[in-house]
Image (cartoon, rainbow, N blue to C red):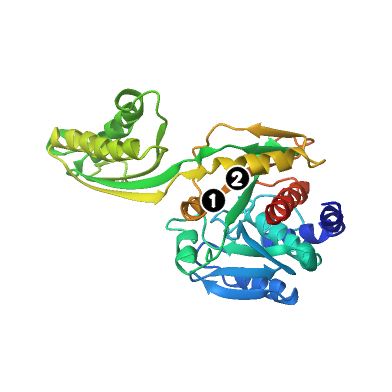
């Protein structure tokens, strides 16, 4: 590992340069054009086998070692978010209303330079390494499922992935076997009442009042209907009823997200939401529409591979601590890969110790300590090499 780590350290400035180049040129999910072309060209210059347009916009590059052996897959996502960046940095996003606010630029830069270093050790590698560069992680149905259907996991024995994690201090690695991230679903509701004059509510069916009642009562599903030993989240992020100030709204639109780990809890919440919605509307002679969209399943790490990565991480000098973390209610379509092959997904701490504030992921001022990319590359690199021994 000394040679690999030395190569990665020599190329650290290149990791940073690539990350900043991509940060300036973010692209939204399912609209990625420049980024996958850049990735494919980078791998081609390394002499790797490259497939473009995998699952529509993904890129897969394969390094074949000098000796026969098993196959490891490493995955990085590369899409951005519809956020106007508010950071005052030299490499600020040049695309209006689009920002790498989740660290996917760092994931991509890490994997590209790791590939470059591993190519320099090609003849020593016993087996193959597949670099999966995935589009559209941020928006369901995501890119992972389509890439898998297009063959990105063919012949793969194990898969590893990481997320640079700004809330966690630099030098810390978070691992967990079993469910580490939740299923991420969404719902859309329209309550149809009867509009009218604000001075004569008795002639109307106020959709805003009904919507407010529904949103308030919605939280009782988790607190009073779900087994308290199970985990679930229901959050409303959108409530729209646009009218003049003196007009009673006839329509209210509500959108939100549901996060669960157990399929039985997931199914119960689907039914409970509609039961509550129906009772709210029936009592006021209103009607409704209700649509529930199942998003990514939970990310469930395999124990053997999780223990394997945790042991490796503890032996890397830059890693100060390896922590078994609680499950997160966030979602990730990395879940689909591990439904097909063994693997694990871990978090690499990326909070700069000198920053007073570490803005959360998906925030307009999100950023991370770029040294975390080097740590992530070392953990992924050593996991790859040790697995192929």
- The single residue placed furthest to the front in the displayed view is 68
Which residue is labeled 1 in the image?
342
Q: Is residue 290 left or right of residue 118?
A: left
Q: Is residue 86 left or right of residue 3?
A: left
The label shown at residue 311 is: none
Earlier in the chain: of badge 2 and badge 1, it is 2
x and y percentages locating residue 68 in the rendered image: 68, 67
Q: Is residue 375 left or right of residue 154?
A: right
Q: Residues within 10 Å of mark 1 (few under 14, many from 20)?
A: some
Residue 61 against residue 262 in the figure, above or below: below
Which residue is labeled 2 in the image?
305
Residue under the point 24% across and 38% down:
271
Q: Determine which quarter of the picture holds residue 356.
A: top right
Q: In front here: 248 or 263?
A: 263
Question: Quick one: quadrant of the C terminus?
Answer: bottom right
Residue under the point 63% across and 75% down:
50
Q: CA distance from mark 2 to mark 1?
A: 7 Å
x and y percentages locating residue 81 in the rendered image: 55, 55
């Amino acid at each position: 590992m000394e040679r690999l780590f030395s190569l990665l350290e020599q190329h650290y400035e290149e990791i940073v340069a690539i990350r900043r180049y991509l940060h300036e040129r973010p692209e939204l999910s399912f609209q990625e054009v420049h980024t996958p072309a850049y990735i494919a060209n980078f791998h081609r210059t390394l002499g790797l086998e490259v497939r473009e347009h995998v699952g529509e916009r993904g890129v897969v590059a394969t390094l074949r070692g000098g000796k026969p052996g098993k196959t490891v897959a490493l995955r990085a996502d590369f899409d951005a978010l519809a956020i106007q960046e508010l950071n005052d940095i030299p490499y600020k996003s040049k695309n209006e209303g689009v920002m790498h606010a989740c660290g996917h630029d760092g994931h991509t830069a890490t994997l590209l330079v790791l590939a470059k270093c591993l190519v320099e050790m090609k003849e020593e590698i016993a087996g193959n390494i597949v670099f999966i560069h995935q589009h559209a992680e941020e928006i369901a149905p995501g890119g992972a499922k389509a890439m898998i259907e297009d063959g990105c996991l063919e012949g793969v024995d194990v898969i590893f992935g990481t997320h640079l994690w700004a809330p966690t201090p630099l030098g810390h690695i978070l691992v967990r076997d079993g469910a580490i991230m939740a299923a991420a679903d969404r719902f859309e509701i329209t309550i149809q009442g009867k509009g009218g004059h604000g001075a004569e509510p008795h002639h109307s069916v106020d959709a805003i009042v009904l919507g407010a009642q529904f949103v308030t009562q919605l939280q009782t599903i988790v607190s009073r209907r779900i087994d308290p030993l199970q985990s679930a989240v229901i959050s409303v992020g959108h409530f729209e009823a646009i009218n003049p100030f003196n007009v009673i709204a006839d329509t209210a639109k509500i959108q939100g997200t549901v996060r669960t780990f157990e399929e039985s809890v997931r199914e119960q919440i689907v039914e409970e939401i509609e039961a509550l919605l129906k009772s709210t509307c029936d009592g006021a002679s209103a009607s409704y529409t209700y649509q529930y969209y199942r998003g990514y399943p939970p990310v469930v790490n395999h124990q053997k591979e999780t223990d394997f990565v945790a042991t490796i991480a503890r032996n890397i000098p830059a890693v100060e601590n390896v922590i078994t973390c609680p499950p997160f209610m966030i979602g990730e379509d990395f879940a689909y890969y591990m439904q097909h092959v063994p693997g694990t997904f871990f978090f690499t701490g990326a909070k700069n110790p000198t920053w007073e504030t570490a803005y959360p992921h998906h925030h307009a001022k999100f950023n991370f300590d770029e040294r975390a990319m080097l740590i992530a590359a070392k953990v992924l690199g050593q996991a790859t090499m040790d697995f192929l021994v």
